[in-house]
Amino acid sequence: MNRFRLNGVTYYQEYRKCGKAGCRVCQRGPGHGPYWYSRDRLGHREYIGRQLPPSIEAARAAYRQKFEEMLEERGRLRLALTAIESHINGLGLSNDEKAALQGLGYGDTLA
């Protein structure tokens, strides 16, 4: 099932049981759906439907893209930190470490 948080609202999917005694869908599987719901910070729940609105899908895609960019930047910063620690300890720098420092604007000052 899908679940994600965006701007303080949690969006999630659930299957629902209809409660009808002869319902084959509920008897043979998890129930009807899945349906999208949202829950805000105060715990208010709202039914959305089978599909997310296009605006929420677009915001979700933009968030994923930004998150991926942040993960890449974190990797570059970690590598630069390793390079700085290596320099402080008098160790040589790898080409990747030199590139990470150059990406932060240090050029060849630590290389």
Image: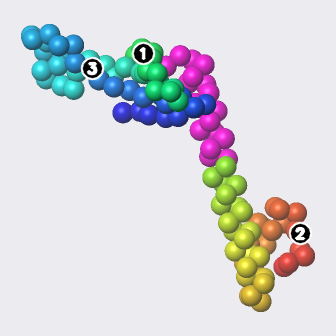
The local crowd at label 3, few if under 14, some if 14 to 19, many if 20 or more residues have their Cα within 10 Å, is: few
Residue 70 x %, y %: 67, 49
89 versus 52 height, above or below: below
Question: In the rendered structure, which amino acid carries the disc numbered 3?
Answer: Arg
For this orientation, the residue located farthest to the left is: 22
- The residue located at (67%, 47%) in the rendering is 69
Q: How is the image coloured?
A: rainbow
**Residues at marks 1 and 3 touching, judged by CB atoms closer than 8 Å:** no
Circle 2: element type? loop
Q: Mark 1 or mark 3, which has the lower sequence index?
A: 3
- Residue labelled with disc 2: 107
59 inside magenta stretch: yes
Q: Mark 2 or mark 3, which has the lower sequence index?
A: 3
For this orientation, the residue located farthest to the front is: 42
Question: In the rendered structure, which amino acid carries the disc numbered 1?
Answer: Tyr
**Left or right of 47: which side holds 40?**
right
**Residues at marks 2 and 1 touching, judged by CB atoms closer than 8 Å:** no
Magenta residues, as a range? Answer: 52-69
- In space, the residues marked 1 and 3 are separated at their CA atoms by 12 Å
Q: Which mark is residue 47?
A: 1
**Left or right of 96: which side holds 103?**
right
64 versus 101 height, above or below: above
- Residue labelled with disc 3: 16
**Residues at marks 2 and 3 touching, judged by CB atoms closer than 8 Å:** no
Q: Quarter holding the N terminus?
A: top left
